Image (spheres, grey):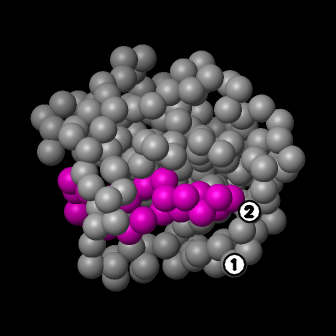
Amino acid sequence: MLNISFCSLIIVASLQISGAFSFGSSNSRRAFVETLTTASIVFAAQPVLAANDLKIGGSVKFAGEEIMSPKEHGTSSVPVQENLRYGVSRKQADKICNFNRHFAESAGSFRETSFEDTVRKANGPVTFYDSNSGKPLFVAPIGRSVDEFIEESMYHGWPSFRDQEVVWDNVRVLKSSGETVSVDGTHLGRKYPCDRDY
């Protein structure tokens, strides 16, 4: 692990892994955001190749607002897939992924799904997919234990991924806002620096 006080962190809204997540109250969100620094240290480790040659990690890839321009189905060309993993509501995921740029559901909602049990039983990193396109977006945990991944996700209220866990060929961060999106226009969440020593 890096001996720095901040790391680059993506807090994910809605993926095929789950519905989107938000902070529990405006007070906890405000407290979290107020503790963030304006400086973001980007962890640019050498990319890891998964068994299927999927490039994971590396440098953050940025995009402009045009990636989220209106398409056939909100900001995406297609609606959310049927039968999302972990028992997630398709209707809610579709609303948050394709017709939303700023919000998500209640903090900790992922704890009401089979997410934690599935991740703990996986015996290795789990691949998380775009709920619209089915493209891989994140592979986690990498460079930390399952317990650390779950703890960090619970702390933030969303599944939380580090740069070394991102499939940057399929994910972009909007420079103007930190909004994290898929290359196909799926709203995923926000990119923040860590405010704890993970």
Residue most extreme to the front: 53
Instruction: Give the camera-side residue of 61 and 121.
Output: 61
- Is 148 covered by the magenta stretch? yes
Location of mark 2 (residue): 80
Type of amino acid under label 1 = Asn
Is residue 72 left or right of 157 when viewed as pictured?
right
Q: Position of residue 134 (x, y in %)?
A: 60, 63
Type of amino acid under label 2 = Val
Q: Position of residue 45 (x, y in %)?
A: 22, 38
Instruction: Tell me what residue is drawn at x 30 percent, y 25 percent.
Output: 41
Residue most extreme to the right: 72
Q: Position of residue 123 (x, y in %)?
A: 27, 78
Task: For the C terminus, give its image quadrant.
Answer: top left
Residue 87 in which image quadrant: bottom right
Residue 10 in which image quadrant: top left
Q: Secondary structure at mark 2?
A: loop
- Is 184 covered by the magenta stretch? no
Instruction: Tell me what residue is drawn at x 55 percent, y 58 percent.
Output: 135
Vertical arrangement, residue 15 with respect to residue 5, above or below: below
Vertical arrangement, residue 70 with respect to residue 72, above or below: above
Distance from the alpha carbon under mark 2 to that under mark 1: 9 Å
Instruction: Give the camera-side residue of 117 and 78.
Output: 78
Whether residue 155 is visible here, answered yes or no, is no
Task: For the N terminus, give its image quadrant.
Answer: top left
Vertical arrangement, residue 132 with respect to residue 120, above or below: above
Instruction: Tell me what residue is drawn at x 46 percent, y 43 percent.
Output: 169
Question: Magenta segment range?
Answer: 125-149
Instruction: Tell me what residue is drawn at x 84 percent, y 50 percent.
Output: 73
Circle 2 Cα neighbour tier, 10 Å, few/some/many (<14 / 14–19 / ≥20): many
Vertical arrangement, residue 162 with respect to residue 134, above or below: above
Location of mark 1 (residue): 83
